[in-house]
Amino acid sequence: MNTLSLITKVQIERAAAFPAKFADNPIRAASLDTIQRRNAILDAVFYDVDAMTEEETSDLAFWLAREGAVILVPPSGADRLKVFLTAEDFLKGAPSVAALAIAGVGSSALGAAAFARNVADAIGGPVAAVVSGYGIADVLTEALGGFFWFGALNSVRHAFEPLDAMTKMFSRSEHASKNNSWTRTSKDTETVIALLQDKRFSPGLLVGHSKGNLVLSEALYALVQEQPKVAERVSERSRIVTISAKIGMPSIFQHVIDVVGEWDWFGALNSRPDIRADLVVPHAWHSTNSNFPMGMGIDVPQFLARAMTMFESEAPPARTARLSLILDAPQRAAAALRKSSTSDRT
């Protein structure tokens, strides 16, 4: 199934689902529908959507997989993927996965699954993908230049998240949910935290792309702040690969490899200036779609395999983090605010 057909199918699925979404929450549906439709187009630009089958695309319609959902993505040609709306639903089945993958750039479920499929093909095992998605907080941040211009300081989106929570109060399905609390941590970040802190979930590889790297960073900082013993356990087993944005991780996470495109100015705006790139992809920019015109996309399976080889070496690359206390201040602040908010609710 070609890229154009996939995007067309996703748009048809979303149009069919709109009446149900509007009946459930008219304010949220009307506010975000245009953004969500645009994201399906962005998915084709930034992710290898051709890796997904027609049947899988149907499973990934927006009304089935929203922000914070978890998708179990097997390698190409293996079992059919499965969608879980919450981390708790995913953990009930306790599926064994080899990696956790988090896409970015306002990706929909299609982009998240396509990115995870590339990771699954690289390591030859199933991958859990967290849908990053878009909430009103993200829309307002982008309107101010958020993810594109604030670079490492793009955690400013948390300032708008009370508005996100307020719109969910109008939802029939979510009105009684505990997630309607005035949280200051994004739902995608909360999902990553819920997965990593659970002993049933123990992937050895954590992979992010673009904003997905920030989501992972905030989740790890939250664990260090709230559950240091859990964070230590996760750090001992974890190997982290960031793609298209060099984001700071807590100091106990030493096994980190940063992959960037040679021409990726977009990712450079969202990167820590004091972190050097470990792998530079020649002539590539922000896309992970290797079929991108002029070969400007990053071949995720190829460079992920190279990163895994670097991890296996006797001397894995060491991160330089001279400015971490300053440049990681947004992640630290978000973790502290989340801890305070959690304490107030208990």
Image (tube, rainbow, N blue to C red):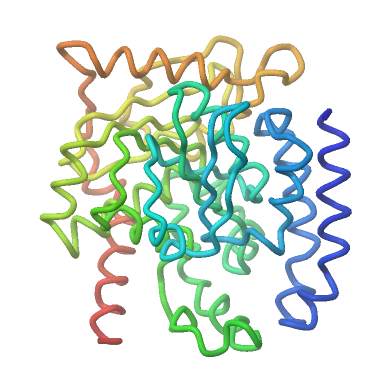
For residue 101, above or below residue 150? above
Q: Quadrant of residue 324?
A: top left
In the rendered picture of this protein, how many numbered marks are placed on residues?
0
Position in image of residue 124 (x %, y %) = 46, 23
User: Measuring 53% from the left and 72% from the top, which residue is drawn there?
Assistant: 160
Residue 123 versus residue 223: which sits nearer the camera?
A: 123
For residue 180, above or below residue 204? below
Position in image of residue 152 (x %, y %) = 42, 45
Q: Quadrant of residue 304?
A: top left
**Left/right of residue 213 with respect to residue 85 in the rendered view:** left
Which quadrant would the C terminus be assigned to in this image? Answer: bottom left
User: Measuring 39% from the left and 62% from the top, which residue is drawn there?
Assistant: 92
For residue 270, above or below residue 197? above
Which quadrant would the N terminus be assigned to in this image? Answer: top right
Kindly give the residue lying farthest to the left in the view shown: 229
Residue 192 versus residue 88: which sits nearer the camera?
A: 88
Position in image of residue 220 (x %, y %) = 28, 51
User: Measuring 26% from the left and 57% from the top, which residue is drawn there?
Assistant: 197
Position in image of residue 261 (x %, y %) = 53, 20
**Left/right of residue 221 with respect to residue 298 in the rendered view:** left
**Left/right of residue 142 with respect to residue 222 in the rendered view:** right
User: Measuring 43% from the left and 61% from the top, which residue is drawn there?
Assistant: 87
